Structures are given as C-alpha cells and as structure tokens.
Image (spheres, rainbow, N blue to C red):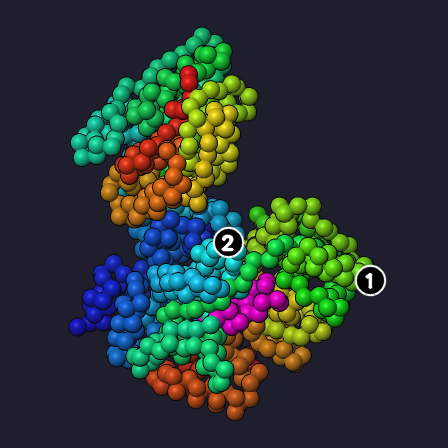
Amino acid sequence: MSLLRELQEIVGKEWVVSGEAATLYSHDAFLLHKGSPSLVVLPGSEEEAVRVVRLLLKRKERFIVRGSGTSLSGASTPLDDEVVVSLARLNRVHSVEGFEVEVGPGIANFSVSKSLPTHLFYAPDPSSYQVSSIGGNISHDSGGIRVVKYGPTYNSVLGLRVLLSDGSVEEIRTSPLLNHKSIFVGAEGTLGVILRARLRTFRRPENTKTLAALFESLEKASRAIVEIFNRGVNPSGLELMDRYSIRAVERSRFRAGIPETEALLLIELEGIPEEIRRDEGVVLQVLEELEAEVIVPKDKEEESRLWAARRGAFPAMAYIFPAYITLDCNVLRRDLSKALLKIREIARKHGVYIANVFHAGDGNLHPLIPFDPNNRESMERAVAAGVEVEKVVIELGGVPSGEHGIGIEKVGFMRRYYTEDELKVFRRIKEAFDPDYLMNPCKLVQREDCRPASEVLTKLWEAD
Amino acid sequence: MTLEEAEKEALKCVHCGFCLESCPTYNVTRNELFSPRGRVLAFREGKSLEVFASCLFCRRCELACPSGVNYSKIYVEAIRRVRKLDVSSVVESPKLLSLTLRALRRSRPYLPEPREPLTHKDERAEVVIFPGCVTSVLFRGLVEKAVKYFRAVGIKTEVVNGCCGLAHLHSGNEEGARRAVERLRERAKGRPIVGLSSNCVARLKEEGLEAYDFAEFVVKRGLPVKGRAELVTVHDSCHASHFGLGKYTREALRMLGAKVVEMEEPNYECGAGGYSFILNDDVSEAVSEVKKNMIAKTGAEAVISTNPVCTLNFLRKGLRALHVLDLMEA
C-alpha cells in the first residue's frame, strides 16, 4: 500500500495533505528556504500520532514534526521532500493540578495560561506566544521577555512523554541524577517526538510596574542594564529597542509614540507594592546616574502600548522590507555594549539596515536584518552581515543561538562555536536516539551527506 | 481593488503565523490549509487557491496581523477565481431574495418568513434608514419599529432598501460591490445613514459614507430609549467589530436597562460566514458550535446580534437572538 493510503487509513482522508496544497507547509517563519514536502499528515490524537510516526519509522521515511510553524530558524521547514507531521491538533489540556499543567504539544503557549486558574500563569513568553506551540517551545527551549526572571522553557518543563525512534513511548520525568529531560529540550525534534508535556506554572504577581528609559548612547543603556543587576534588582522584563527598531515600530500599527533615540530600555518590576517601590527607587537612581530620560507610563493602557510595541517590533519590520533574518545570539550582559557597537559597524560595512530589539536583561541579542526577497543582491548582503554578526558574538565569548534554535539557519555556526570533539559527541547522541537520521534531518546536528538546497543556504552553512 | 493591490498586500506577509489562532477556521481544523497565513501563501504561489473557499471572511486575521496585511484585498481577488456561487444578483433584488429564501425555508425552518420590504418616506426626511438586504425581507418588524421610534423622537426618515455590497465581496464581485455602494451614496444624498445591519454599516463606513449603526446613532445623538430589562450577552459581528461598534450596542443596552454578561470572546466569528451556513458547510458548522458554547456559558437569556446573518445562524443553532430594537419600547 502506498504511504499516502496507509496514512489516510490512520488519520482519515481529510487529514493528509498531498500534491500542490502541501506547498502551504513548505516553510515556517524562516524566509530563506522553502522545501517541498511530499505529504503532510495531521493526526488528531496521541494514539494516531504514535501510529503515524511508527509507520514513518518502519518505512524509513525522513520526517519533520511541526507545531504552529513559527520557527525563526527554519527548524520546522523541510529541507527537501520530508514528510511533515503536524501535531497542531494535539492541543488538549490533560490536567491542571496545584502548580502543574499537562498539555498536548500542539497547544499554543497562550492557551496554556488561559487554561489555568486566574492566580497562575505559564512563564515562558516568546514574542510568538499567542500562537507558537508548546511542543515547538520545548524543542527550541524558547525564551521570551520573562526569561530574565523565570528562565527559558527548560525551567518550566517537569516531564515529557516522548516517542522514540524504536517506536517506544517513554515517560521522561525530572530526576536528580543524569537528568534526561534536558536532552529533549532544545533538541529541535531531532531526537524524539514530544507527545505530551507536564509544565510548571507560577503564581501571578500581585502587581507590575513598567518604566521606560531613553538613552542617547548604546553604551550608557548597556551600563544601566549591568548596574540594575549589580544593585540587586532582578526585573521581570528588561528589553532594549535601538533607534532602528523604534523607527520600524513607529511606522507600524504598534506605534506607541516612542521618540527616536539611540536606545530605549523597557523595564518591568513585579511583586507586592513594597517590593516594587524598593526596586523602582534603585532603578530610578541608576537611570539618573546614566542620564536617561525616564518615562513613567501614566496608566496600564500606556504600559501595554509600550509592551505591544516591543512585541510587535519583529513583524513591524515588514513596514521596512517584506522579509528579514532574525538572529538570536547571546552575549554576557557586560559585553552588550561592545556587541551592539560592532553590529552598527557591520551594518554600515554591508550597507544593510540592522534593527536591534532584544532581551537585554539576559544578553539575548536579536539583530533583525531586513532584505528584499525579490532582490538577490539584497538577500546576499543580509546573509553576509548576519554571518559576520554571529562571528563577532562568538569571538566575544557568546553563543550562536539563545532561543530561536539552530534549525537550518545556523548549522554553519555550530562548527565555529563547538570543537570537532564536541560535535562528535553531538553526533553520537543523535545516532543513539535516531540512528538513521530520520527525525528532522539536517537540522541542529548534521550527517556528512546533508547538502544545502540553495545558494543562500550554502552561504549560511559555509559560514566559516 | 486590483490584482496589483492584492499582490502588494500578500507580499507584506512575513509568514510569522501570528494570525493563526485568531482565525476561526484554523481554530476548528488546526490545519494550515484553513489558515490566513496558508491562504496568503497560496495566493502568493498561485497554487491551491481553493483554500479560500473555506474562509468565512470575518477579517479577524487583519486585527491580529502585526505586519498590517489587508487580507480582505487578497481574499476578494482570490475568491473571484474560485467562487462556486455568486449571490450578487440575488441580494440585489428583494423579490429574488424572498423567492430564494422561501425555497430554502422548506429544509431550513429556522429562517423567518420573507416579507415585502417596507417603503416609507417622511417629507423632508433628514435621516436615511438602511435596513440591509436580508433585514429588509426577513426582519421587516425591526424596520417598522425603527421608523416608529424615530417618529416618536421627532426625526424624519426615509427607508432606503438595497444592498451594501458585502455579499458581493464575499463572492469576489468587486465591481458589483462598488456599484452597490455608489447606488446607496446617490440615494442618501448626503444625509446620515442609520443601518439596522451592523456589518453593512461597517462596509459603508469603510467606503467613506456617513453611516451609523442604530445603537451608535442613538448613543451619539443622546436620544431617549426605554426598554425591557433582560440578562443578555452581546455578539460583536465581525466587520462591525473592526469599527468598534460593539461599545455603542452595550451603551444602548445599558440605557435600556438591560444587563449585559460578557462572553469569552464577543467578537469571535458566529460561524455564518456570509452564506456558508446556509450551505451546511462543515467548517462553518464547527465554528458555529464554538460560538454557541461561548454564548451558552454566559447563562444569558438572549444573545444580542445587530447583524441579520449572525442572527439567522444563531436561530439555526436554536439560540434566542435579538436586535437592540427588539428590547426597545417603540
């Protein structure tokens, strides 16, 4: 029986997409490559998902597991004609108890918080939280604005149900020794299929307060970031938007009336009123010393306008150019200033627009490099600038990806960052879990036979 | 709207997917083929345009889109090429509309009995009452009540029957939609238009006409209202909610003495999707069920619907659906 027919028998005819319509699964939010999936299958239950994946494994089909398809690194983009398994329909809330919630991998991050009693919330909040799936969040160890206080997704995962390449379904629980939960967080779907996740939630803070500070130099803004922590304040959000991202946002529907300045810091404090008052005093002192102009939003509405501007900053780039590369390299807070100035230089050198809007509190840079997808030269300049940014960050001791994943975008940087021995260890891990390289092939950890499917990918992969 | 404009809009899409969860047809299928992002990609690639057929054209994705894609322009251009049914000529003629509805009524008993549209004209009428095509034949009682009400508060009115062109757009008939608006513009002769179908009002506003939803007009003019105190929930019909018309509905209800208990997402698509519900479309039915559950959870005695197609779909689902006017003492 053909694969199509066998899949149809498991999930029903309407849940297998083939032919031309499969093009709609040809890529995620990473815009530099489109695959041509041979089939897309959308199981409607955990049981169907298990049967589908077992069938693909038995037939030695290469496949990709996909959630909402919002990956910025192309982790859910087929390189070639891989089968796409969408787990978007596995979006159930299985249980809520105490501070724990158990969900299917296809549920949107936002829907997890919505399913909780009002006094709780799910902390990791990537900008795509309204739509990105928990399975995808786990597979990318997604961060977000609250990382600075609550940590990335890893810190919120308590247990996983995973389907392995031998067809077995394993319950992975947190263990004090040789904790194997960690291996699936950030694995980008290359080691197993996440069927269920047990997540921890936190008590919603009594109050929050937002401060905004305008700086005339990137150096001073960077110093303020370091000082806030040095003086014992751990904000629940600490974001930076530079001149170029402010310009993009203010042209978009997220405009919040932010004056164009070198850097804007958005600082969120939370806790009981006494705590907030204490922290606010410290932060205001730091801002004053560094000659920032402070804006205290007059009400919750103004606060949420500012945060919406921050959250909308990525897609707002569309008002500049219809496509962009988003890098997410990470440096230590104390190196932010150096990194930002170098990025400015790189932008000038390559004649590209680079906007920085990022999680400053945890040093997670997000240089956005827009390009015109219909203009090859523009695309190439953006790629070249991106490659150079990554190099600079790695030279500063940073890491190539903080939260968006390696995907197909940053595989080239793996060699630059990790030693050959480290990469060998990665490959051994990959081969232990997926000896035939069937799961999300050519992402994160590559076998020698992976070939870039386009010139742009060649440029990215041969980055060193 | 032209192909060029639609293409320009489609190019703005950065494929971020932020629209996904806002889309009712995606919510019930969780399949990219039923999502705004998938549809925009289909349009860009010129492939599988039939994915537009399941779109309920509620335009919620436009509210969610951070890149400002005007999906509507893409939809109209795409649906024109794949439409199976163009209802333009039916909605333009009250007679044909009545005949069609009468025939449909045999298998769809929830549809009210069609009636002749009301004609009414005061001398020196200063305000135009625009019922909208469906309201004019299926909810004539509302039109009568509106006329009586305005007479009581001393406002001279003329009832102008016709179509706003929204149904044309849903069928991809851009030209017909434009003509419908032009006809209305001529007949309004610069007078303010008070609509009894809120999605039509939204369409007229978007086309630059001075149009008000009934409740909006009452609130903005500070007109007196009296009515029944009921426990209701408010459905914000899709196009109308783009113009924030729901706040006037609520204000008018408050003035009437009705108590509003809000549902989870008042502006969530009712599921009707123009005429999709009449065609017993599976996706439309699944969305209708989601909406019905949201309404049921409120415990309200009735759902307030200011748009006739939503009302019909609520009736189909066995709900008690009322217009603001239904609660008023005329």
Instruction: Specify whether residue B141 is painted magenta.
Output: no
Decide if residue A203 is in sight here.
Answer: yes
> Up-down: is A257 above or below A449?
above
Q: Residue at x 23, y 67 (%)?
A: A10
Please name the residue that numbered disc 2 is placed on. A118
User: Based on the displayed image, in which of its 4 quarters is residue A377 positioned?
Assistant: bottom right
User: Residue lying farthest front?
Assistant: A98
Q: Quick check: B90 left or right of A455?
A: left
Decide if residue B4 is in sight here.
Answer: no
Q: Residue at x 41, y 33 (%)?
A: B232
Q: Residue at x 41, y 73 (%)?
A: A160
**Front residue of this view, candidates A341 and B278:** B278
Q: Which residues are magenta?
A: A139-157
Q: Chain of mark 1?
A: A
- Indicate the amino acid at tag 1: Glu
Nearest-to-viewer mark from 2 and 1: 2
